[in-house]
Image: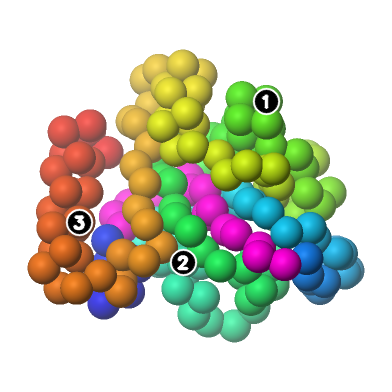
């Protein structure tokens, strides 16, 4: 089982939470190289292609595949913590990145990172303390009250014992059904 097995196949927007335990030099294609400080990071992306959130966020949580996107280069040195997601329009990606900066105190970590196809400063944010999911969920609900609420899946979901993993999948399915995701 992979992390993607706990995620919906619908399209949506996600936050990949990462921890960088030590400072690291990261080379990210045309963006070049940058030394990133240790700490908590949040990368915001959208997944509206084949396989939806299960394919994209699942790939980022597992670290599978070749390095294709900016975040893949960071993912090679950072530890995944969790994924936050909701079945919302792709353009919400920009709003979520802004919300993480304004409401949760994230600092844009690398100009242009994950934002080569938009005018956002960056889709990678650095935090001095890890952002709390409940805090993000409340802020997103206040900003977009008609959107389905965000859901969190731990990065360790694929490594849970079978019984706990089944319980998590059932819990996420029930939560998505109740919340209309």
Residue receiving disc 2:
61
Would residue 169 be found to the left or right of residue 139 on screen?
Answer: left
Residue 132 inside the magenta-drawn segment: no
Identify the disc placed on residue 138: none
The structure residue drawn at horizontal position 33% and vertical position 30%, both measured from the top left corner, is 148
Element marked by disc 1? helix
For residue 125, above or below residue 165: above
**Is the residue marked by circle 1 packed among few (<14), some (14-19), or many (20+) residues within 10 Å?**
few
Q: How is the image coloured?
A: rainbow
The structure residue drawn at horizontal position 52% and vertical position 42%, both measured from the top left corner, is 90
Element marked by disc 3? helix
The quarter of the picture where residue 99 lies is: top right
**Distance in Å between CA atoms under marks 2 and 1:** 25 Å
Q: Nearer the viewer, residue 126 or 130?
A: 130
Q: Nearer the viewer, residue 130 or 108?
A: 130
Residue receiving disc 1:
102
For residue 1, above or below residue 41: below
The quarter of the picture where residue 37 lies is: bottom right
Would residue 141 be found to the left or right of residue 41 on screen?
Answer: left
**Distance in Å between CA atoms under marks 3 and 2:** 16 Å
Q: Which of the two discs, 2 and 1, labels the residue nearer the N terminus?
A: 2
The quarter of the picture where residue 128 lies is: top right
Residues under numbered marks 3 and 2 in contact, where contact means CB atoms less than 8 Å apart: no
For residue 119, above or below residue 3: above
Of the 4 image quadrants, the one containing the N terminus is: bottom left
The structure residue drawn at horizontal position 61% and vertical position 30%, both measured from the top left corner, is 104
Q: Which of the two discs, 3 and 2, labels the residue nearer the N terminus?
A: 2
Q: Which of the two discs, 1 and 3, labels the residue nearer the N terminus?
A: 1
Of the 4 image quadrants, the one containing the C terminus is: top left
Residue extent of the magenta highlight: 7-22
Residue receiving disc 3:
168
């Amino acid at each position: 089982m992979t992390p993607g097995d706990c995620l919906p196949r619908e399209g949506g927007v996600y936050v990949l939470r990462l921890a960088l335990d030590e400072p690291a030099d990261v080379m990210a294609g045309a963006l070049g190289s940058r030394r990133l400080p240790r700490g908590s990071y949040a990368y915001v992306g959208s997944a509206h292609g084949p396989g939806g959130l299960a394919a994209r966020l699942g790939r980022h949580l597992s670290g599978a595949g070749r390095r294709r996107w900016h975040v893949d280069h960071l993912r090679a040195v950072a530890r995944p913590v969790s994924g936050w997601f909701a079945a919302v329009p792709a353009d919400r990606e920009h709003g979520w990145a802004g919300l993480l900066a304004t409401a949760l105190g994230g600092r844009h970590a690398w100009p242009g990172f994950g934002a080569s196809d938009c005018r956002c400063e960056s889709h990678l944010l650095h935090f001095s303390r890890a952002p709390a999911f409940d805090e993000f969920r409340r802020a997103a609900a206040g900003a977009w009250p008609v959107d389905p609420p965000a859901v969190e899946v731990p990065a360790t979901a694929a490594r849970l014992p079978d019984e706990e993993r089944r319980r998590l999948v059932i819990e996420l399915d029930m939560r998505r059904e109740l919340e209309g995701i």
